[in-house]
Amino acid sequence: MNMKKSSKFFAAALAAVLAFSVTGCAGADSSGEASSAAPSAAAPETSAESTAPVTEGDAPSGTLTFLSWQNETVMQPLLDGFKEKYPDVSVDLIYAPPVQDYVEKFQIMYSTGDLPDVFVTAAENKGEVLDNDIAMDISYLPAFEKMSDKNKETYTKDGKIYAFAPDAWIAGIFYNKKILEDNGIAVPTNREEYLASMATLKANGIQPWAFCSTNLYDPIQGYVATETINKNGSYDSQVNNGELTYADGWSEPVSLWAADYLEPGYINQDALGLTGDQVNEMFAFEECAYMIGATWSVATLDELNPDLEYGMLPWFGTEDGVAWMTGATGVGWSINAKAKNMPAAKAFLEYLSSDESLKIFQEQTGGLLAVDGIDFPIHPTIEEGYPYLLEGKFYLPAVEWKYSDALGNEMLIGTQEILTGNITPEQLVENMDKKRTELDAEQ
């Protein structure tokens, strides 16, 4: 991909699926998985014609209804571009802000039979959309050939893709280039070098890390990605259906977290008294070498210290060459399987997935496109982590958890209680499985 470096990056709330993770310090929206309250719909009959792209012979016209996650200000340039291409189609944009308002609006419109021709599928309504055959298979769209596998897989069921999600966000380890250089430390390329860098910094009287009370378990998520998900991409679904437990995939990551961060004192009770703003200031004014940073963090840091030189690292695994980012796919556009104006709906998705439209969408949202071949501005710090996004090497448990709110809270409070000595790291994992079992029994 061709990428232009830019000192300006658009702070984006791309995926409101984060539940108690990096957003606790970064200030982005957080939410859990919404329950699916709408009744089941009969599976629509799908013909070759209904899943085929719009052809030159088709002449879309009339009114297209569109339930949007983004407001009219964001979407208007795209609507204008679509209107120029299809002047006989008028788009009726219905905006519902994320996350709860959108999900409620979606469920009401679906249950009453008024779901628009095109709508947004997100983590919070994904299960409902896929399980009830609400959306049409759009695997035929050419843009999927250039999209990262992770983005395609997010809204895929039984080999068919039901939403076009063009972007994603990532989070990882921000490092201060000057501090590392002044202490004779090369930028780490694996876990061994990374751990050694922290030991050197501590020995030299430099604070290696700054955490706040709500992102203590981000390194655990990193180790779950490198030690569990990297070996078994189906792990979360196997936990959700009862085949595996959290002890199977989280025990080792939690132990590594305790050994690598707690025992050396890089994470300590000081974090319980720090806010996200304070952590940002500590890093910006070079009071620590590392912090958790995300795509939306750079705008704040650059404003605090325009001269700050910093980069981005992934979470390194115990095996050389294995590294992942925290992150999640953004929301996707779907076609209602029972769309009242199917020709216009298919034309709209074809336009939204075009290079022309995606470039406009990126300019409007500042998102990180997961579609190769499109030139767009990217902050030089985030550029260091961007290849992991394109490779699909990013992971967020909250997106996969069956009970995001409850389990996220378990991790949030549990990691804090470990620091205060109320529970052990082993008990944290036990409590996760206990909570999941309790919630399963209530279903």
Image (spheres, rainbow, N blue to C red):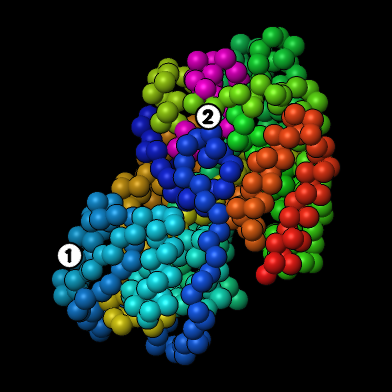
Do the residues under discs 1 and 2 have CB atoms within 8 angstroms?
no
x, y percent for residue 173 = 60, 32
The correct choice, above or below, for 113 with respect to 29 in the image is below
The mark closer to the camera, 1 or 2, is: 2
The disc placed on residue 276 is 2
Magenta stretch, residue numbers:
278-297
Check if residue 291 falls in the magenta segment.
yes
| Residue that appears at 28% across and 72% down | 65
| Residue that appears at 50% across and 65% down | 125
The correct choice, above or below, for 390 with respect to 49 in the image is above
**Residue toward you, 329 or 324:** 329
Residue neighbourhood size for the residue with mark 2, other residues' Cα within 10 Å, grouped as few (<14), some (14–19), many (≥20): many
The correct choice, above or below, for 80 with respect to 265 in the image is below
Between discs 1 and 2, the one toward the N terminus: 1
The disc placed on residue 106 is none
The correct choice, above or below, for 40 with respect to 436 in the image is below
User: What secondary structure is found at the residue carrying circle 1?
Assistant: helix
x, y percent for residue 171 = 55, 40
Could one spot residue 350 in this view of the protein? no
| Residue that appears at 40% across and 38% down | 11
x, y percent for residue 146 = 47, 60
* Left or right, residue 350 beside residue 387: left
**Residue toward you, 96 or 350:** 96
* Left or right, residue 105 beside residue 190: left
Residue neighbourhood size for the residue with mark 1, other residues' Cα within 10 Å, grouped as few (<14), some (14–19), many (≥20): few
Q: Which residue is mark 1?
A: 84
Q: Quadrant of the C terminus?
A: bottom right
Check if residue 139 falls in the magenta segment.
no
Label 1 amino acid?
Glu
User: What secondary structure is found at the residue carrying circle 2?
Assistant: helix
* Left or right, residue 349 beside residue 410: left
Alpha carbon of mark 1 to alpha carbon of mark 2: how far? 45 Å
